[in-house]
Image (spheres, helix red, strand yellow):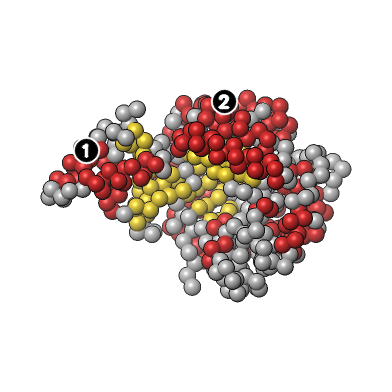
Amino acid sequence: MTRPRLATGARLRYDEVREEHLLLVPEGAVRLNPTAVQVLELCDGERSVEEIVGVLSTRYDGADVGEDVRGLVEAMAQKGLLVDGSA
Amino acid sequence: MAAPKPFTLIAELSYQCPLHCPYCSNPVDIGHPKYRGELETEDWIRVFGEARGLGVLQLALTGGEPMLRRDLVQLCAAARDADLYSSLITAGTLFTRERAEALKAAGLDHVQISIQSPDREENDRIGGNRSFEKKIAAARAARELDFPLTINCVLHRQNLDRIEELLDLTLELGAQRLELANTQYYGWAVVNQEALMPTWQQLRRGEEAVKRFRERVGNKVDVLWVLPDFYEDLPKPCMGGWGRTAMVLAPNGDVLPCQAASTIPGLEFANVLEHPLEWIWNESDAFARFRGTGWMQEPCRSCPLGRQEVDWGGCRCQALRLTGDAAATDPVCRLSPNHELVVSARESAQTEEFLYRTTKRPHGSDVGGARASSANYF
């Protein structure tokens, strides 16, 4: 997974009724914590995983977010929710 | 206790359909005058907004055949405006490239196309209509327009042996999901149960074929496969629990807790032309009747497995059909005093002959009578 993007048909949204972030997919939804939302918003099929790490690290004053981001991307890819945009 | 927030609205836009599948989940009396009326465009649009306000996120546009609605493009646009994730559940025969483009532009999110069998002749025989080629063309059109695509196949004794071909066809069509939906025995499937009930050997072979496919293909195609109720000994949380996650809107505006709830005598269904959806979901009798655990009888009431809030007592319609009491424990449960009825139903496979779904009274049959006596069908 070099340049992740959301799988076809997956849509990020905030649910005002439940007050939580969700990733909507065909006939289902995945609840997202605030960190996951920030990562997924950057998964545009253009940025590499390392670039996403860089953006978020800068946003959080140089914090080391590499492991968290890579773990999340891998888990979402396993579930078929992220696909490789460079493929 | 406050009602949970619904997740899914199943919008049955029309009971009209070019296909005649003998296991259709629509009521067996779809020809009845009470089903003749269909909601107007503005009614549906209002309901979509009300549904979102209640918490609904997923909208299934189904039927019958939803593509028979001339306002479908408008309804898809309204779903997008209401911020609902919309799925079109179609037989595919009317899903031409031109209409698909219009639906895409309107904001339709996902397309699910049914296939009755991966074999052309068998598909057309089961659906009672020459439809296979159109379905394949529809699936290709959906993928060309980059719709996420689900192929749905209702499984039964007469097509289960083709599961391998079906898996390969799904892969070849570029679908992301394959829903292998075991026939559920309500609606028309009850009338045709003896022609549909699979054998245990077929299910085992099917399960193995799915396993091999998953190993070979990985997560490229998400295959949804669940053993049918009749071969289990603990019930499933039907509809995610009564009045917990989903509601069904019939074409005439009646709101039901599940597609088969109209088979339960004494349940009154409120209509969106008379009541706000919020009241129907939170307050109406049909939704309150079996919501939660307070209505449960023994053995559910003192469930030794602690599954009250896992399976929510199973399926009410199945309990009714098999025991005559909609508030009984689902006989699929091995703790039910009626579990033997489920065991014996597995052995009921006897005929290959279908009684086709129709709005007319099928020739030489008494469908109304079959429904009225469905509690004693075994």
Residue B319: percent from the left, percent from the top? 69, 62
Residue drawn at the location 52% of the way across and 30% of the way down? B171
Q: Of residues B201 and B368, which is closer to you in this image? A: B201
- Residue B113: image quadrant is top right
Taking the view exactly as shown, the residue that stands out farthest to the right is B364
Q: Chain of mark 2?
A: B
Identity, as a three-letter code, of the amino acid under mark 2: Ala
Instruction: Decide if residue B198 is on the left or right side of residue B14.
Output: right
Q: Residues within 10 Å of mark 2 (few under 14, many from 20)?
A: some
Disc marking residue B338: none
Q: Of residues B37 and B277, which is closer to you in this image? A: B277
Residue drawn at the location 59% of the way across and 48% of the way down? B226
Residue A7: percent from the left, percent from the top? 39, 37
Disc marking residue A50: 1
Pointers 1 and 2 in contact (CB under 8 A)? Answer: no
Residue drawn at the location 30% of the way across and 49% of the way down? A36
Q: Which residue is mark 2?
A: B137
- Residue B133: image quadrant is top right
Instruction: Decide if residue B367 is on the left or right side of residue A60.
Output: right
